[in-house]
Amino acid sequence: MQPLHTVLRPSTTLLSTAESFTNDLPVNPLSVILVTLRALNNIAATSYADYAASVTALMSKISNIRAAYRGATIFDADPLDLAMVYGMFSKWWPIAGQTNQINNDVRSVTFPLLFGRKAFDPTECFPASRRGDLVLTTTTAADPTGLDGFTMIIETIELLDAVPTRFIKVTSSAFSLAAGDVNDISLPIGNKLLGVLCRSGLFPTAASNDAGFNEVALEVDNVEVMQSRATWRGLHALWARRTRTDWLQMGHRHLLDIIASTTDPVLTTTALGLSGTAAAGSSLITGNDAATLGHFGVAPHPEQDALQRYGLVDLDLLDDLSMALDTKGAADINLHVNASAADTAARVLPIEYVETGAATA
């Protein structure tokens, strides 16, 4: 097996408004698609509180990305949701470029789209196909606040001579959850199910404990299996078990990101366990403005907000398919959801394990 890394779509300038691109994917067995978004800062930001050009903002330039084989979906979802799925299984997370807070400086993010649980596996990727059968459709959105001048590059990594026998399939569905123990979400039938990623529009924040996926049960033909009742905190913990929580650069917060204020000094170098002398005419840390103290939890960073939205119904706990839910022969599979309050922006992404047989697309 020999990998072949090529450029599918060279650097393409994106409009500031929504548009759509279609590309025929390579005909050889396909393991990875790499999407790079580059943009320019369009504000002279002074703090993370007024600087929306985060990794999540960069990725929000693409509203949906879909791969389809002869019209049948292989993956179809918001790119940030897909990044969560592939990161959980492959441990390959989006990577950000420079993060300068200077007007017109370049920012970028590159994220992988996979056809298997891990990259470069010759037994688990998308099989060889004919030209035009496997198509990638990318739909963009309006420029997010704080960014403009977007360009996009798409690359592919094929596995020549590979003979895959399976691939993974990820689809996304949006739901409005009614308050109470009254919601049933149908899941796909026919393949093994590795898990279901739940993206909640309503999640615990500030003084509220409300969650759209407050309690979740998995039912096969009206019988609870594997998950009798799981709370949102439990689902979020299962998601966190598979996640590098610093992949959005959550760990790279510096005191220099805090703006000095000239009023109401409440933090001192002593209080923070620091030592040293500030430069003449300045202070290391002053001020109690919420915007300036966002890194201490007063005002959540946009990426912290994004990470709180995900929970996982994990059905492959040992990563060896021994616990994967085989849905063949089932008449009905659904998530039964008890929402503590109405959630109009809930999404679920079933992760299917498709067995094709040798050299069969």
Image: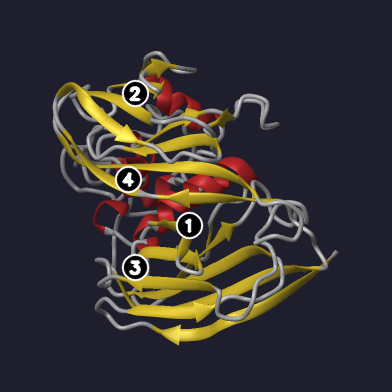
Do the numbered discs 2 and 4 sit on residues whose CB atoms are within 8 Å? no
**Upstream in the sequence, badge 4 or badge 3?**
3
Which labelled disc corresponds to residue 75?
Answer: 1
Residue at image coords 30%, 79%: 19
On screen, residue 342 versus residue 305, left or right, reads: left
**Upstream in the sequence, badge 3 or badge 1?**
3
* The N terminus - image quarter: bottom right
Q: Nearer the viewer, mark 3 or mark 1?
A: 1
Q: What kind of element bears circle 4?
A: loop
**Upstream in the sequence, badge 1 or badge 4?**
1
Spatial CA span between label 3 and label 2: 29 Å
Spatial CA span between label 2 and label 4: 21 Å
Q: What kind of element bears circle 3?
A: loop
List the residue tagged with mark 3.
Answer: 61
Q: What kind of element bears circle 1?
A: strand
On screen, residue 82 versus residue 299, left or right, reads: right
* Number of marks drawn: 4
Above-or-below relation of 356 to 290: below
Rate crowding at label 4 as few (under 14), some (14 to 19) or many (20 or more) other CA atoms within 10 Å: many
Along the viewing direction, whichever of 85 and 174 lies nearer the viewer: 174
Rate crowding at label 1 as few (under 14), some (14 to 19) or many (20 or more) other CA atoms within 10 Å: many
The amino acid beneath tag 4 is His
Along the viewing direction, whichever of 119 and 12 lies nearer the viewer: 119
Which labelled disc corresponds to residue 232?
Answer: 2
Residue at image coords 41%, 28%: 236
* The C terminus - image quarter: bottom right
Residue at image coords 80%, 62%: 162
The amino acid beneath tag 1 is Phe
Spatial CA span between label 4 and label 3: 19 Å
Question: Based on the displayed image, in which of its 4 quarters is residue 309 positioned?
Answer: top left
Spatial CA span between label 3 and label 1: 18 Å
Do the numbered discs 1 and 4 sit on residues whose CB atoms are within 8 Å? no
